[in-house]
Structures are given as C-alpha cells and as structure tokens.
Amino acid sequence: MYLGLAYGLFPYLVKVMVPKKLRGINMPPDMPKTQVTAGQKLTFAVLACVLLCFLFPVASPLLFSLFLGIVIRESGLEKFKYLVNEIILYASTLTLGLLLGVLCEAQTIMSDKVLPLLLYGMLSLTLSGVGGIIGGYFMYFVTRGKFNPVIGIAAVSCVPTTVKVAQKCVTQANPSAVVMHYAVGVNIFGVITTAIIAAVYLSLLQYT
C-alpha cells in the first residue's frame, strides 16, 4: 500500500496542487562552497544520535539504527557496508516477509479492524504528501520563486520512491529540468524527521 500510494496517488496530488508552470522550475545544482568531510558527517551522526537518545530514550533503538547506517557508510569500511547493504538488508527483508506470510491468519486479514487501519494509513500518507507540498510552496515564496514546490513531496520518507516521483512530475512539465539532487536531500531530512516524530509518539504513549 505504501509504495502503491506513492507511485499511484502522489503524481496526481502534485498535478492538482502545483500548476504546470511551477512544476517546470529548473534548479541547477549549486557547487558547494565548502566540502563536508566524512569526519564531519560522522561527528554529526554521533552527536545527533546521543542527543536524541537522551531526549527520547524509549525510541533509542530506532534512532540508533538510523544513525548507525550513516556511521557505517561514512566510515569507509567496505566490508561492513557490503554486510549491511547486501546480506543483512536482503536477509531481513526475506525473513520478515516470510514470517508475516506464515504467521498471518485469515481471521486477522478479515478482521473488521483491518479496513479502518488501511483507510487511516491512506489518509495519513495523503496528508503527509499535502503537507510536503505546502512546505515546498513555503520554500518557493521564501526563495522568491527559485525553489520548485514539487520537491516538497520528497519529504515523505519513502526512500527513494518520492524522489523519483518528484523528478518524474518535473520532467513531464519541463524535460530539461533536474531537481533530483535537491529532492534527495529533502528525502533524507524527511527520514530523520520521521524518526524524531516517531520517538515523540513513543515517548507520549509510554506515559499514557
């Protein structure tokens, strides 16, 4: 459902909320004035992880998993990168899918609680997409028309699906426009924000 809505709903959502003229805004890549080193990225990951874990201890496993990936990627340890990206990723995906398929009973699928949950999930994804585009419009006005509001849809943390959706919508309006490099950055920040919001929810649920 997650990927289905991202590919099926979000392009239409973008076309409804963003006129073709704005969808075609081109954003050529800016050369960074300062090069961010791997050490600086590692420092950011460690400090952010420690700070967020102190603020939301109940969500420490989630936050640690997120920033651990950044540390492994920037550390330059190719064997660990291969272990995580290839072996652990595919093995865990296969195991999770297999266990869910084996353990899921017909009574669970046919329960009267499943349909409302699906509808709530679809509504939350739709509202997330709307919120992302509104954020894109905010940046459009802040930059005085230099920011393509379509990039806001990439804030929905479906990696990298929403990035590809944003680029496809922009390409349809202006074949020469490229916004993927900006959309990737927005997508990563969406992932970090999602982890923080999930940590807040977990912390609130712990005390209710």
Image (tube, helix red, strand yellow):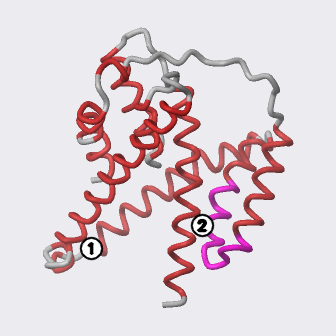
Q: Which element type, helix, strand or loop, lies under badge 1?
A: loop
Categorize mark 2 by other alpha carbons within 10 Å: few (<14), some (14-19), many (20+): some
Residue 120 % position (x, y): 26, 66
Q: Nearer the viewer, mark 2 or mark 1?
A: 2
Question: Label 1 is placed on what type of residue?
Answer: Cys
Residue 179 magenta-drawn? no
| 173 lies left or right of 94 | left
Q: Earlier in the sequence, mark 2 or mark 1?
A: 2
Q: Residue at x 25, y 70 (%)?
A: 117
Q: CA distance from mark 2 to mark 1?
A: 25 Å
Question: Label 2 is placed on what type of residue?
Answer: Leu
| 139 lies left or right of 81 | left
Q: Is residue 142 above or below residue 127?
A: above
* Prevailing SS of the magenta stretch: helix
Q: As rendered, which of 83 and 15 lies closer to the eye? A: 15
Q: Which residue is mark 1?
A: 104
Categorize mark 1 by other alpha carbons within 10 Å: few (<14), some (14-19), many (20+): few
Q: Which residue is mark 2?
A: 62
Q: As rendered, which of 173 and 57 lies closer to the eye? A: 173
Residue 158 % position (x, y): 43, 47
Q: Residue at x 58, y 63 (%)?
A: 196
Q: Residue at x 54, y 39 (%)?
A: 186
* Magenta stretch in the rendered image: 53-68
Q: Residue at x 70, y 73 (%)?
A: 55
| 195 lies left or right of 14 | right
